[in-house]
Amino acid sequence: MGGTDRRGGGHESGDRGRRREHVRVAVIGSGFGGLGAAVRLRREGITDFVVLERADSVGGTWRDNSYPGCACDVPSHLYSFSFAPNPDWPRTFSGQPHIRAYLEHVADTFGLRPHIRLDTELLTARWDADELRWELETSAGALTADVVVSATGPLSDPKTPEIPGLAGFPGAVFHSARWDHGYDLRGKRVAVVGTGASAIQIVPAIAPDVERLTLFQRTPPWVLPRTDRAISSVERWLHRQLPFTRAARRGLLWGIRELQVSAFTKRPNQLGLIESLAKANMARSIKDPALLAELTPSYRIGCKRILLSSDYYPALARPNVDLVASGLKEVRGGVLVAADGTETEADAIVFGTGFHVTDMPIADRVVGAEGRTLADHWKDGMQALRGATAAGFPNWMTIIGPNTGLGNSSMILMIESQLNYMADYLRQLDVLGGRVALAARPSAVNRWNRQVQARMERTVWNTGGCTSWYLDAQGRNTTVWPGTTGEFRRLTRTVDMGEYEVVRLREPGPGRVPVPAAAPAGETAAPAEGGAA
């Protein structure tokens, strides 16, 4: 493709009078998705690729989220690549330092460092319909690529609410994903805004050291105990010496979560027993009836992300911790005013208010075949064929795209399924040969999205009576996958060429310039196994 072979190396290409480096594949981001894509490319025999990373090290969200107490809520042996097992996880649920170290290890073990370009942020990506390639402008210069794999992830750009008066707050202000390690919270009056997965880890981690901690809670979460423990040296020895024990452990963790899916997606009423366990977890630590009432959710468990913690409720029972069961409305100097009128003085504000998930900022930087940005294309809701490709954006693929998130299992399973799809996508381009692109047919994207949304109607995420970050501004669930990880893997094992239009360059005649041409219907392959969900 475009003068590159399957193994190849980066080289220059003509670009309307300028010389730009050209690669076959450009991967954006170096978290689990980006590093996984890089490993898969090498295993497919493709070495003509780069990984563009805006930060100064790899790790994605596990690099950015370094707040006190940061840890994963998926068991360690399931939250790792199947092709890069780690027999030496120290705990059943890993902390941020261990996960980040694991990703650094993956980058080293699979020889990815020469492909990774740190401090290189994607500024714009524009499809060149004349050359059938992507023009990429980055903070470190320009290049072109035949295929772009976007692995920026939905948990990469923090969301901080617009609070009147916040700019005038005299103390420290930062988001949980941009933790200010230079600011000492000890002995300070700290306000934590939000009660999501980050906040319930931060509160117990800092509560013993601060003078007073005030938690602003707009909606209480459901919290189950976190059954975390150290993995013994004997277990680790067994996993090193007898790999089947490690595989069995991973398989058991996966199977349990697969069996849980039907309760979330088809029978939300079955989740009542889980609610009882969560209430018992709460009652063990919270003895004040008024506080207990404020902490008890009014929606079905699972509607919002179920959180895991064994020290969150004990922290809220501490004498130096206050709960304000109302969102932050206004800041007046050093005083924080809640929606219910409660006033709190603070020296620092920590926002645990999540990320731009349904309005990913990278979408504003991507311009497709029709001259529209991906953000404009998605203004009425994100949608992508099999969670990967959007109509109007040829040879552009997203890892952890629309409706690929999970409510109860490991995202690494979904990432690996999408890597299978990416690999077959590139194989199909090789089979077609020459300068060629695959463009998702709008009819295929719409059909996939309609069927996903139809399945979503009876899920707990849509019927549970809450407003969550799974839903976009129109109230549509464009985030979560309404099925099992096994089903998603079957549906993304191969590319169904009937869902794509093959776009080629026409051979230029005298005085003519090349223009894209759609391939005739006979050039598409037979549909692959599986249809829309």
Image: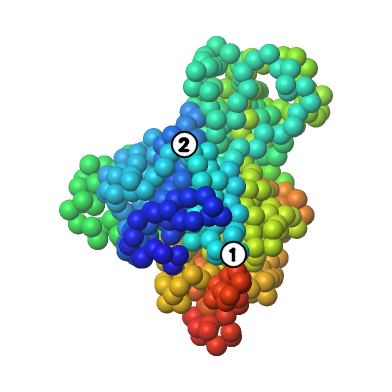
Q: CA separation, marks 2 and 1?
A: 30 Å
Q: Position of residue 98 (x, y in %)?
A: 36, 38
Q: Residue at x 58, y 75 (%)?
A: 510
Q: Position of residue 115 (x, y in %)?
A: 37, 48
Q: Amino acid at mark 2?
A: Asp
Q: Position of residue 1 (x, y in %)?
A: 44, 67
Q: State whether residue 151 appears in this view.
A: no
Q: Is residue 38 left or right of residue 316?
A: left
What residue is disc 2 on? 119
Secondary element at image label 1: loop
Furthest residue in direction top, as rendered: 187
Q: Nearer the viewer, mark 2 or mark 1?
A: 1
Along the line of sight, which residue is nearer the eye, 299 or 131? 131
- Residue 423 falls in image quadrant: bottom left
Q: Is residue 530 left or right of residue 217?
A: left
Q: Is the C-beta separation of discs 2 and 1 under 8 Å?
A: no
Along the line of sight, which residue is nearer the eye, 283 or 433? 433
Q: Residue at x 53, y 17 (%)?
A: 183
